[in-house]
Amino acid sequence: MTDLKKHFAVIGNPIHHSLSPQIHRTFAKETGFDIEYEAVLSPLDEFKNTIHKLIAQKLSGANVTLPFKKEAYELATTHSSHAKIAEAVNTLEFKDDQIIGHNTDGVGLVRDLEQNLNINLKSKKILLIGAGGAAEGVIYSLLEKEPSELTLTNRTIEKSHVIQNKMDVHAKSFDVNLNVIEIAKCPNQYFDLIINATSTSLNNSDLAINHKVFHKSSLAYDMTYGKETSFIREAQSQGSKTSDGLGMLVEQAAEAFFIWHHIKPKTKSLIESLRAL
Ligand code: ATR
């Protein structure tokens, strides 16, 4: 008998912690799709082979997580505009001989902020901390929302300048003031939104940021989830509102689901039930 089920996977290393199988299976159940979705551990130097094996097994699509988002970008034969700008891919579609690369991280973050946390980003002042893959993956989506100011800061200031140079033309076209400041010299001014896109929360290391950037009306958003981080603790001690990145995780998955199945799943109740866990 032919297997009519479509097959999907998330590929990373490590991967045992991934909530993606649970999220996609829940979306499929809710929208009436019969799919298989598995977590696949790829050896660090075997990403390309892992993908080709999965394609040979008739996989329809895959999510890609750390540390393979750059390699997925290089492997893709066609790219969405967001993937092209981020030079990173977290969602792959396998169609005929094509490997189409998308990046849904930025859309996921913006949707969580705007739809779940009710922040209208237009004309807001945003501080984005970090200049690694996580920051690069979301900065264009933030600029698209036309904040009045987007300030980048990073421990290694040169890396912020690299992103600034890459994004400057987009910032100008959206009329956004794109600045870079040194992390230790965060000025005595507050931001409406402060996003932690460093790996400090994953590594449990401290983020040396001037607490004056937090304000009672700020939202401090940590892109990681599932743990209480020093960034969130610091923000709370200054009276800021806080959020972890669980909503972003679910929203980027919902956008990947939409790319594969052309239907938008509901996200709010899933975010609530995952948070309850
Ligand atoms: P990711 O893909 O998660 O962004 P990455 O590309 O390795 O991972 O980037 C990690 C980011 O976290 C970088 O911006 C890094 O700062 P540096 O560019 O100075 O290395 C930041 N980071 C990691 N540990 C940090 C720490 N203890 N304090 C401040 N920033 C830190």
Image (cartoon, grey):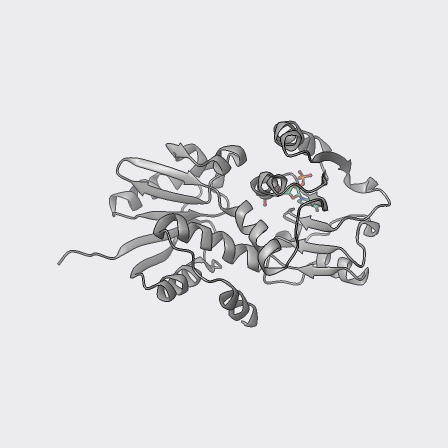
Q: Residue furthest bottom?
A: 276
Q: Is residue 46 visible?
A: no
Check the picture and name the quadrant holding the N terminus.
Answer: bottom left
The x and y percentages for residue 231 are: 72, 55
Q: Residue furthest right?
A: 188
Count every numbered label the image shows and give the total. 0
Identified at 30% across, 46% down, the residue is 54
The x and y percentages for residue 267 are: 49, 62
The quarter holding residue 5 reads bottom left
130 on left or right of 269: right
110 on left or right of 3: right
Residue nearest the observer in this picture, 137 or 198? 137
Q: Is residue 203 visible?
A: yes
Q: Is residue 33 above or below residue 48?
A: below
277 on left or right of 149: left
Residue nearest the observer in this picture, 130 or 193? 193
The x and y percentages for residue 162 are: 65, 29
241 on left or right of 38: right
Identified at 36% across, 49% down, the residue is 260
The x and y percentages for residue 196 are: 67, 49
Q: Residue furthest left?
A: 1
Q: Is residue 121 above or below residue 78?
A: below
Ligand 1's quadrant? top right
Identified at 76% across, 58% down, the residue is 235
Identified at 51% across, 34% down, the residue is 87
Check the picture and name the quadrant holding the C terminus.
Answer: bottom right
